[in-house]
Amino acid sequence: MESIHQNGIPSIDVLESEWSSVLAGNGCRWRKRFFYPARLSTYALVTVFETEQDAVKFYEGNIMKKYTKNCVERRSYFMYCIHTHGNWGGANPLEVCENPDLTKKIAIITRATIKPMLAVKFWKFVPEVSKTLEDYQGLSYSKGFGEWPIMMQATFSVWDSLEQMKAYAYQNPSHAAMVKKTRELNWYREEMFSRFVVWDEKIQSKS
């Protein structure tokens, strides 16, 4: 998992490989769940570009062609950040877009470094929350990943609308309980929450 720290246009590529890679981040046993065991054939590349043109050029360039040649599935999302707080690796690489089109799909990235002494307690709560994502109305896609999957964990989800994303975040009892526990136990050493408008998505699969 690689993060390029530049202000501008964020994108994410989620790659399903034919082989297990030591460079891999965290996958999920089921597509809509964020818990273990990790799938080392799934990995994510998060990038931030100066312009939309730079993002598309990188997506279509030789570097990504080599990087994805063994993929059986590739999902690419091009986004504008509409809200962000916190840090990733000591900094926040995102810049909030003005006047976004909120009628488009909404994406969420949450990323946290878990305190080692609280990791076991944290992971006990994850399966219950992740199960609530299954077939949740408005969920288009979700995946978990991380630089160091046990301690540095991130989640990525895409929603059909802002209203449906908020319904899950604020009306789901399991999710609300997880947020409450986070505040009570303070189990993150560092965290970042970011919300995006998806302005383009590309899905490629090998038949």
Image (spheres, helix red, strand yellow):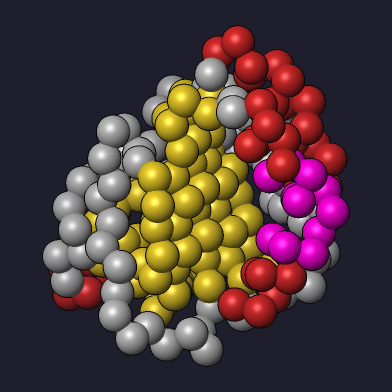
Q: Which residue corresponds to the image point at 51% horizontal and 66% vertical from the top-left? A: 107
Q: From what the image shows, is residue 11 above or below residue 167? A: above
Residue 161 within the magenta-colored segment of the rendering: no
Residue 75 image offset from top left, x and y in percent: 48, 61
Q: Which residue corresponds to the image point at 70% horizontal and 51% vertical from the top-left? A: 31
> Predominant secondary structure in magenta?
helix
Q: From what the image shows, is residue 200 above or below residue 64? A: below
Q: Which residue corresponds to the image point at 46% horizontal and 25% vertical from the top-left? A: 189
Q: Quadrant of residue 35?
A: top right
The front one of 28 and 69 is 28
Q: Which residue corresponds to the image point at 29% horizontal and 74% vertical from the top-left? A: 97
Q: Which residues are magenta?
A: 169-179
Residue 85 image offset from top left, x and y in percent: 40, 52
Identity of the residue furthest to the front in this view: 184
The answer to whether any part of residue 78 appears in the image is no
Left or right, 8 with reference to 100: left
Residue 172 within the magenta-colored segment of the rendering: yes
Residue 154 image offset from top left, x and y in percent: 52, 41
Q: From what the image shows, is residue 181 above or below residue 8? A: above
Left or right, 81 with reference to 73: left
